[in-house]
Image (cartoon, rainbow, N blue to C red):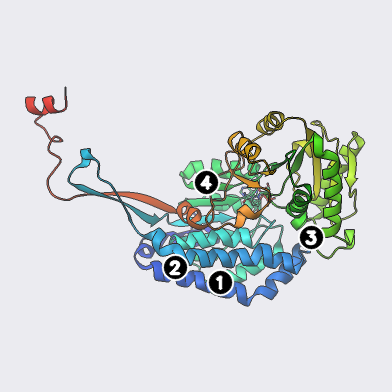
């Protein structure tokens, strides 16, 4: 390892302290570290709001609801339950291990790398850090280069709150991430796109670091024939247009039953007008992250319209402020149908029977989230049992992310492993099997294997 490279030096500083940390970073110290982080977030709330406004015009209420409160809730939940999560668990001794006692002891993995995306740049950087510290690890955190104001603020908050042998921030883009990935971390927690996630896993294969991958994809939303259409429209408009659709669990597209397609369209137009009454001037519209992504979205929309798709509401906009847009008659040749949209454009697709809708979902990679709006519980159960996804939201969108007792994660191309609460703690922990011999050795184990022993084990 290059001792002159500051990133490698930081890694060595943290990893050389790992053994000592096992003895000194117990429940009290971990809770104190989390409390310091909560205090820092509260104290710097105004700066956080300003940084997110600079990076992508996020409205203050949205910053508080989606970036700050979820972190404070995660810290409170983790601190409350950490003692129980850390406690060794006794398990039964089977007959074959008669005379022993068995335990699962949870230990920190060691030195961890957290790589975060830009779309909820504070929440998705500090959220995994909460679990990482709760599990007793040190961390190097690399926030996204696409949100420079927030990333600089995260670096500042971390430097003020933690010694760098416990937590350090390294800013930069792809090259910095690749340099970090070459180091032998004990665990890598990555949030971002499936394409980069696959590169992270390939890099981890070289050092055999364990990985948690929180990825994305096209999350479908099904409207059943018995859905409450006004409620469905409101939840979908909220889930899709919050943060300008730049949310990993936003509904990517809607599959609506043919019998309710027309009234659902009307309900959706109404809901969008209620949520964003000023159109492009609405103060609650977030900007698209940068010009490149705005051009990508404008291109996807323009291409679909050129190929015969029709606007239901919204439409082409200029610059990074994009109108909430709903579009129909989208076909498989269009980019909108192929790629994760990750912006405020919502295709409406029509289906005639549920097995057909489920087959269309199954033909794509397994999604991070799947939503179903329907009052008939039988149909809902049919969807839950007949599909695979990281999570399912029934008659709601997005809320599954912040439920403290639910794991959050994807499956295969939408992710590997889970985050939040006890699942986050476990992602950053090794569960060590401990078996103690309480009195005599297990009698049949040792030679000489006499005729009596051979008879007892039925040879
Ligand atoms: P991204 O994959 O482009 O970047 C994520 C991070 O990886 C950034 O910090 C970036 O600097 C770094 N990176 C870039 N190239 C790298 C490389 N070659 N090796 C290692 N690291 C590299 O993702 P993004 O554009 O920031 O975020 C959008 C994607 O993230 C979407 O697909 C979205 O669905 C997904 N996402 C998932 C979750 C989740 O919790 N599952 C949450 C938010 C976003």
Badge 4 element: loop
Density class for disc 2 (Cα within 10 Å; few <14, some 14-19, many ≥20) is many
Residue 450 can be seen in this image: no
Q: Give the mark nearer the N terminus: 2 vs 4.
A: 2
Left-right relation of 336 to 166: right
Residue 105 position (above or below residue 386): below
Q: Which mark is residue 286?
A: 3
- Residue sitting nearer the eye, 227 or 73: 227
Residue position marked by numbered label 4 in the rendering = 417
Question: How far apart in space, not on screen, are marks 4 and 3 (Cα)?
Answer: 30 Å
Q: CA distance from mark 4 to mark 1?
A: 26 Å
Image coordinates for residue 281, horizontal then vertical, percent: 89, 63
Which residue in the protein does label 2 denote?
Answer: 30
Residue 41 visible, this angle: yes
Assess whether mark 1 and mark 2 are in contact (beta carbons under 8 angstroms). no
Residue hosting label 1: 38
Cα distance between the residues tagged 2 and 3: 35 Å
């Amino acid at each position: 390892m290059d001792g002159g490279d500051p990133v490698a030096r930081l890694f060595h500083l943290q990893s050389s302290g790992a053994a000592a940390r096992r003895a000194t970073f117990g429940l009290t110290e971990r809770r104190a570290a989390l409390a310091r982080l909560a205090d820092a977030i509260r104290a710097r709330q105004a700066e956080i709001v300003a940084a997110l406004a600079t990076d992508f015009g996020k409205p203050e209420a949205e910053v508080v609801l989606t970036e700050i409160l979820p972190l404070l809730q995660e810290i409170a939940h983790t601190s409350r339950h950490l003692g129980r999560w850390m406690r060794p668990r006794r398990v039964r001794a089977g007959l074959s291990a008669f005379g022993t006692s068995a335990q699962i002891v949870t230990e920190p993995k060691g030195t961890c790398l957290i790589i975060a995306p830009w779309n909820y740049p504070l929440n998705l950087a500090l959220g995994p850090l909460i679990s990482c510290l709760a599990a007793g690890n040190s961390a190097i955190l690399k926030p996204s280069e696409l949100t420079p104001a927030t990333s600089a603020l995260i670096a500042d908050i971390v430097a003020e709150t933690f010694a760098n042998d416990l937590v350090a921030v390294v800013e930069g883009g792809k090259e910095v991430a690749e340099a970090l990935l070459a180091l032998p971390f004990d665990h890598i927690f990555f949030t971002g796109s499936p394409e980069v996630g696959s590169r992270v896993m390939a890099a981890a294969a070289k050092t055999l670091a364990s990985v948690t991958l929180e990825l994305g994809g096209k999350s479908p939303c099904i409207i059943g024939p018995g859905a409450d259409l006004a409620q469905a429209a409101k939840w979908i408009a909220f889930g899709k247009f919050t943060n300008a659709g730049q949310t990993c669990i936003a509904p990517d597209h809607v599959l609506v039953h043919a019998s309710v397609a027309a009234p659902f369209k009307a309900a959706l137009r109404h809901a969008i007008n209620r949520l964003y009454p000023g159109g492009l001037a609405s103060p609650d519209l977030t900007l698209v992250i940068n010009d490149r992504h705005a051009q990508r979205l404008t291109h996807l929309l323009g291409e679909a319209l050129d190929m015969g798709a029709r606007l239901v509401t919204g439409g082409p906009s200029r610059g990074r402020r994009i109108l909430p847009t709903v579009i129909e008659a989208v076909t498989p040749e269009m980019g909108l149908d192929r790629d994760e949209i990750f912006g405020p454009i919502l295709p409406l697709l029509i289906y005639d029977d549920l097995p057909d809708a489920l087959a269309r979902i199954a033909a794509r990679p397994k999604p991070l989230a799947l939503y179903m709006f329907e009052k008939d519980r039988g149909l809902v159960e049919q969807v839950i049992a007949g599909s695979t996804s990281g999570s399912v939201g029934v008659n709601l969108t997005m809320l599954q992310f912040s439920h403290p007792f639910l794991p959050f994660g994807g499956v295969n191309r939408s992710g590997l492993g889970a985050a939040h609460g006890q699942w986050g703690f476990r992602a950053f922990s090794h569960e060590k099997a401990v078996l103690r011999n309480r009195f005599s050795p297990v009698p049949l184990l040792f030679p000489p294997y006499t005729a009596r022993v051979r008879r007892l084990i039925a040879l």
